[in-house]
Image (cartoon, helix red, strand yellow):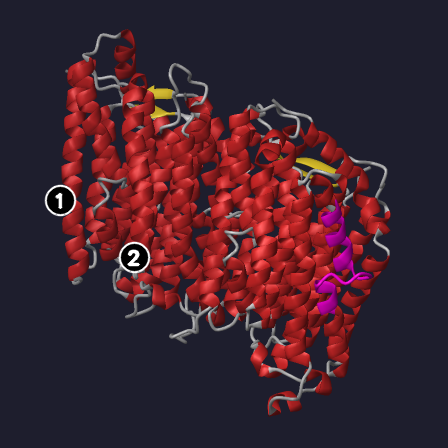
Amino acid sequence: MSSNLLSLAIWLPIVGAFAVFAVGSERRNIMRWLALAVAVAGFLVTLPLYIGFDTAQAGMQFVEQAAWIPRFNVSYFLGVDGISVLFLLLNSFITILVVLAGWSVIEEKQAQYMGAFLIMSGLMNGIFCALDAVLFYVFFEASLIPMYLIIGVWGGPNRVYAAFKFFLYTLLGSLLMLIALIYLFLASGGSFNLLEWHQVRLEMTPQILLFVAFLVAFAVKVPMWPVHTWLPDAHVEAPTGGSVVLAAIMLKLGAYGFLRFSLPIAPDASQYLAPMMITLSLIAVVYIGFVALVQTDMKKLVAYSSISHMGFVTLGFFIFNQLGVEGALVQMISHGFISGAMFLCIGVLYDRMHSRNIADYGGVVNTMPKFAALFLFFAMANSGLPATSGFVGEFMVILGAIKFNFWVGFAAATTLILGAAYTLWMYKRVAFGPIVNDHVRSLTDINSRELLVLGLLALAVLAMGLYPFPFTDVMHASVDNLLKHVAVSKL
Amino acid sequence: MLQNFVVPDLYPAAPELFLALMICVILLVDLFLAQSRRWITSLMTMSTLIGCAAITYATADGQSVLTFSNMFVDDLLADFLKLMLYFSVMVVLVYSRDYLVARGLDRGEFYVLVLCATLGMMVMISAAHLLSIYIGLELLSLSLYALVAIDRDSSRATEAAMKYFVLGALASGLLLYGMSMIYGATGTLEIGGIAQSIAMGSANKTVLVFGLVFLVSGIAFKLGAVPFHMWIPDVYHGAPTAITLFIASAPKLAAFAMTLRLLVYGLFEMAHHWQVMLMIMAVLSIALGNLAAIAQTNIKRMLAYSAIAHMGFMLLALMSGVVGEDRHFMINAYSSAMYYVVAYVLMSLGSFGMILLLSRAGYEAENLEDFKGLNRRSPWFAAVMMILMFSMAGIPFFIGFFAKFSVLLAAVDAGHVAIAVFAVMFSLVGAFYYLRVVKLMYFDAPTDAAPITASLDMRIVLSANGVAVALFGMFPQAIMSLCTYALVRSM
């Protein structure tokens, strides 16, 4: 099957971003509507990917291939399978919400703001469908630039520190990966084709070294404990849109990298190091859960909750069964919706009160009933309430983990308690109780634009929670194929 | 006796002869021009360079032709590097005009000295004989010493010129001493003859290695590699920015050509010896250059240290040509080095061009602080500078990434994995100070609200320079294969 849908999904937002720059912040209205139109168009071109997706097929679909740098045998090679296709949709969908969320809040250089998000959207689509390692790497690193600017230009008071930490931390990981990619290029006899790499036979020592190099790159991005410290800083300082994209999409890149690189390229090392990965994941789930409990800053709390939830994802990958991997993928999508929604909710409050401190709130439900209802829904979803998408993924991973080892499953299941504890406790302190101060008393409820944004997300969360089949159906064949591949030794 | 005199084949040296002739013409014509008509000199200089380019292009037949009793060679490598040379000198002339006019330095001597330096570089590039290398080098160096001191009322520039002259003379002495040793060992000054003599095993190895050490020291000085880098920061800082721009661009091409002619064409049999020397210098340059650049507050000094680090990267490729008896890495390694130099010259031109853009009469924009808030003063040029900085840091999609990539590939291919990891770790350090420039431009408020008053041609060329850095980053194949082709045809 050949089409240009993937190229369109990548380049349409990027080209659109330049149009947005050209219109400029001075013509604010035209620029905003143009940005929205580009974002919506970007989403629409990804829809056929889902509709036309052949769920019975495990291999790559919508493949595009052209020579790019023949000197190094690098090609412009795109394709999606059941693992990646949903992320393109998620990413393009979130981009629309981000554009809407920055509609009136961003005062300074709004055209650059919108453009940066559109460029990032295109680059991240590129990461999810690149099947050439250099192409992947190029998108992977280039996506740091817009995020760095978003945090640094439109961020909070400590934004410079957060932006640098974000950039350098992530660059550290990806530079090691670059060496690993070059090594694989030579080991595979001069190819950067990912699918060919999956078949390259490797000894145990290089496998372990490659796994570690990829681990550094992806663990920073996920982020896994103990390289997670950049995330709370970045989240707290980033503007709402930045936090949303960071939580909803960027964190997924690391997890996606494990599935695309680490597991299939170094299956023996993955099996061998799985106990370490499981331990790190459980530390993230349990320990970071406790850390989240004591946060006084709402954004920081959700940031730690993200780390904890992503621990679930890596746990699901490294127990090597269908339930675990699919549960982890569902968890990734669902976390994209829920964490995005949580950050948007906090953004709604922050735009009105200019504070993220839990202690400054109380009794919000009295002045913002509509908002409080939606916020409660997302808080419940974040703590894994059945019938929301948060439940499905966690439940699948826990089931898979118990199959693998009872105590691993047991430790993972504590998240249901911890997650509920920190999320709902925060919600209680923010929304319930008597109105604590005049600022809260003068709050106005969400306007229709905010309602639209949160409502769309609520629908997605609910739909996925009630009927996850359309999501799992897509990934089934590819995950099955991946697990079969990983089970075969390359030694 | 006259009958023994054979008229040499002048055809291969046509561009040099044309340039030499035009230097005399310009020198004479300029005498009769009033200051208000200096543009005539400028125009003639520009036309001369275009003429040289036309001649070089027209006479480029892909053959390696020796002339002047085997002292001078015209091959594709020389033609390619010369074309790059004319191009960068022309860009230098465009960028520096406003600056020179504003400071009263727009005198005939400037143009003549620049052309003399260009002639010297052309001779270096085409040298096939140790003496012609030396003559070219001295012509270049003496012109540069004078250019650094062209602002004779500036004590800082005079000091820089003195320092440059004393150290440069020392380096020339070292080079000459090394050459005499090699002459002693092989009995010839012809580069081809030297290679032959070593291959036949008739040369005294001890004397040869002794000479090689001095030769490499001289080369390292011209490239500005640690431990012969001391002059770089002081000269870059002390010289008028327009002159710094010149020193930081075109001479790198000539120094590269000299390195290639001496080490690869002449002393290839000694590769095992000089590769170790280059390795030490590369490692030290990358480390020191990147670390010292962090501490700078003056952007010219910062770029000077960054130049040292970049030359270290280039050496990394040069040292990866021969492994054991295996020579199949050769072309790949040397063309990577060449590509790196070309990419570096392009980035260096742009970055110093930006400093010139922000400078105006009576005001030198040479501190990092002067870039503060550039995004609010001129979003377009802030974007250009951002592209240049990210490119220097080696972030895709810019040309600097593929330059680093190909060098790393060559190094890993030759088995230097540890050094490659070392190099990327230091480019992480390097990313910090490039990011700082971006931070100043985008995150900080401007301290200087003066509008940018550069002339139209400079704006256009500088914009094109930035766009070229981005475009050649997206489509690196063209320059890469040109480098490889020129090398293959000239080996």
Above or below for A420 versus B234: below
- Which amino acid lies under the numbered mark 2 shown in the image of this protein? Ala
Is A221 or B41 nearer to us in this picture?
A221
Residue B295, disc: 2
**Of marks 2 and 1, the one in the foreground:** 2
Task: Determine if the magenta segment contains residue A459.
Answer: no
Quadrant hosting residue B222: top left
Main SS, magenta region, reads helix
At 74% from the left and 67% from the top, the residue drawn is: A380
The x, y position of residue A276, in whole percent, is: 56, 41
Residue B455 drawn at (x, y percent): 42, 64
Residue pointed to by mark 1? B166
Q: Secondary structure at mark 1?
A: helix
Taking B480 as reference, is A345 left or right? right
Instruction: Using the numbered discs, state the Cα–Cα distance from disc 2 to disc 1 in whole angstroms.
Output: 26 Å
Say which quarter of the image contains residue B209: top left
Is residue A315 depicted above or below B376 in this figure? above
Q: Secondary structure at mark 2?
A: loop
Measured as percent of width and height from the top left, residue A347 is found at 64, 74
Q: What's the residue type where badge 1 is placed?
A: Val
The crowd level at tag 1 (other Cα within 10 Å; few <14, some 14-19, many 20+) is some
Question: Is residue A85 rendered to the left or right of residue B355?
Answer: right
Magenta part of the chain: A378-399
Screen quadrant of the N terminus of chain A: top right
* Marks 2 and 1 close (CB-CB < 8 Å): no
Q: Count the labels in the image.
A: 2
Residue B68, image x, y percentages:
27, 22
